Image (cartoon, rainbow, N blue to C red):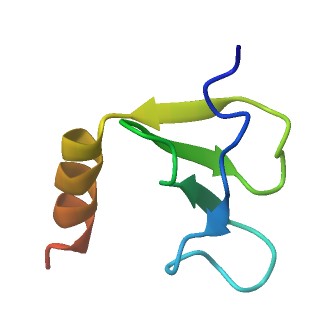
Amino acid sequence: MDILTDAQWRKASRSSTNGGACVEVADNVAGIVGVRDSKDPDGPALVFGPASWRAFVAEVARPS
């Protein structure tokens, strides 16, 4: 069974609005966070644990 079958995907708030670089995130599945390219919804998705995802988001949001 695909662990992301029941995922509810949403476009990331920082994704481009011009239809190019769009990332979708699914955080409604217990114990995981899915990330995929919105232009290829049937393609591969990355899967993170919640703590790893929070660390990634914090690092990306950190001022350079």
The answer to whether 58 appears left or right of 38 in the picture is left
Residue 12 vs 31, above or below: the answer is below
For the N terminus, give its image quadrant: top right
Residue 61 found in image quarter: bottom left
Seen in the picture, residue 49 relative to 58 is either above or below; the reply is above
Q: How many numbered callouts?
A: 0
Query: Quadrant where the C terminus lies?
Result: bottom left
Q: Quadrant of residue 43?
A: top right
What is the x, y in percent for residue 6?
70, 41
Horizontal and vertical percent for residue 63?
A: 14, 79
Query: 11 or 28, which lies in front?
Result: 28
Q: Residue at x 53, y 33 (%)?
A: 46
Q: Is residue 39 left or right of residue 25?
A: right
- Tell me where residue 35 appears, x and y as whole percent: 55, 46
Residue at 55% x, 57% y: name it. Answer: 25
- Judge by depth and name the residue closer to the eye, 2 or 36: 2
